[in-house]
Amino acid sequence: MKVLVTGGAGFIGSHLCERLLRSGSEVICLDNFNDSYTPSVKRKNLDCCVRCSHFRLVKGDILDPEVTDAVMEQEAPETIVHLAALAGVRGSVLDPLSYVDTDVKGTVAMLECCRKYGVKKFIFASSSSVYGNSGTPFMEENTPPVQVSPYAAAKYSGELFCRTYSHLYGLPVVCLRFFTVYGPRQRPDMAVHTFTRAIVEGSEIKIFGDGSSTRDYTYADDVIDGIMSSIDLPCSYETINLGNSVTTSILELVGILESKLGKKAKLSFLPAQPGDVPATCADITKARALLGYDPKVPLEEGIERFVEWYLKRVAG
Ligand code: NAD
C-alpha cells in the first residue's frame, strides 16, 4: 500500500511513518518543516525513515497546488493520512487566521487531491478539543461539541468538510479525535515536554489555573495502532475518539514526572488561559468496536519512556 502522510515529520507523523514502513507500506511524507518548533528537530524525527528505500520525503506546503499536484501525479497514493496542521489551542487564540489557512483550507486542499486523483481513503487528524466545554465526564462521538478556541473550530470545520466530501464524492473518510498524545518526540510546547524540561533545568512550571484541570493522556504507540486500524476500516464516514479513557490532573502529572526524574518541580500558578477546557476524557467504546482499539500503555509507563527519551536525546 502507498500512503501519503502530511505533517509526517512532526511528532505523531514520524511515529506513523515508521510504523507504516515496518508494515511494508510505501510512504511519502509531505511536510513544510515550518518553524512551529525547530525544523532540525523535525528532520531528526525522520532519522530512521530516511534510511528506508520505501520512504520518500517531500519538503513542501499542503497549500501549494504545484507541490501537491506533483506528489499526487508522481506517487498516486491510495491513502492519505492528513496530520499537517498548526496544532495547539494557545497559538490559535493569538493568530486565528493562520489556523484557518492551514487547518481548514489545508484540509480542503488535501480533500481536493483525493477527489481529483481518486484516493481510496482519507484519515483526518481531529482533536478532543472539538468537544470544548461539553460538560460531560466522558466525551462520546455524539456529544454535542461546544468549541471554545479557534483551533477547535478549525478542526471541527475540517471534520465538516470531510463529511461533505464523503457524502458528495463517495470518499471513505475516518476523522480521528486524538486526546492529548504524548511519548518520545512530543511537541516541545505540550505539557509533558515543557514540564519535564522545567524540572530538569530547575525552572518554574507555569500552571494555568489551580492544577485541578484534567486530561486524558494517550501514548503515541496506542494512537498509531488506532490510525493503522482506521486505514483498513471499510466505511463511508466515521468519527472516532482515540484516547486512553483515564483522567489525570495537571498536579498528578507533575507528581509522576517528579518521581520519574527524582527531582521536585517549582510551580507558579497563573490565571486559566482563554480557550483551555477544564477536562477531557474519551469514551473509546466506538474505537474498541470498530478498530479493535485497546490502549496498552498506562501513563506511569509512558511517562517513564518519555523521560528516558528526553534525558538521552534532548538533555544530552
Ligand atoms: P506536529 O506539529 O509535531 O506535526 C505537524 C506537522 O505538520 C509539522 O511537522 C509541521 O511542519 C507540518 N505542517 C504544518 N503546516 C504544514 C503545511 N502547511 N504544509 C505541510 N506541512 C505542514 O504536531 P503533532 O502533535 O504531531 O500533531 C499531528 C496532528 O494531530 C495535527 O493535525 C494535530 O492538530 C493533531 N492532534 C494532535 C494532538 C496531540 O496531542 N499531539 C491532539 C489532537 C490532535
Image: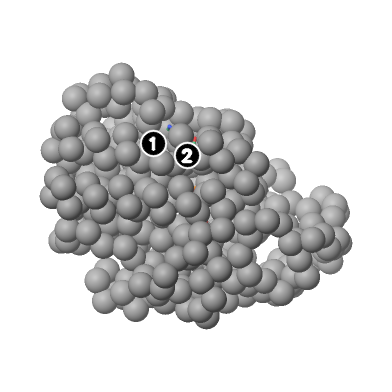
Percent across and percent down for residue 218 are 50, 66
Q: Quadrant of the C terminus?
A: top right
Q: CA distance from mark 2 to mark 1?
A: 8 Å
Q: Which residue is mark 2?
A: 100
Q: Secondary structure at mark 1?
A: helix
Amino acid found under the numbered disc labelled 2? Val
Query: Residue at label 1?
Result: 106
The answer to which quarter of the image holds residue 182 is: bottom right
Category of crowding for the residue at label 1, using alpha-carbon neighbours closer than 10 angstroms: few (below 14), some (14–19), many (at least 20): many
Q: Which mark is residue 2?
A: none
Question: Residue 41 at x, y = what percent?
Answer: 57, 36
**Residue at 45% across / 65% down in the picture?**
145
CB within 8 Å, label 2 to label 1: no
Q: Is residue 190 left or right of residue 196?
A: left
Residue 162: percent from the left, percent from the top? 28, 50
For badge 1, the amino acid type reads Gly
Q: Nearer the viewer, mark 2 or mark 1?
A: 2
Reply above or below: 190 against 106.
below
Q: Is residue 41 visible?
A: no
Q: Kindly tell me whether residue 243 is visible in this rendering.
A: yes
Q: Of the residues under marks 2 and 1, which one precedes in the sequence?
A: 2
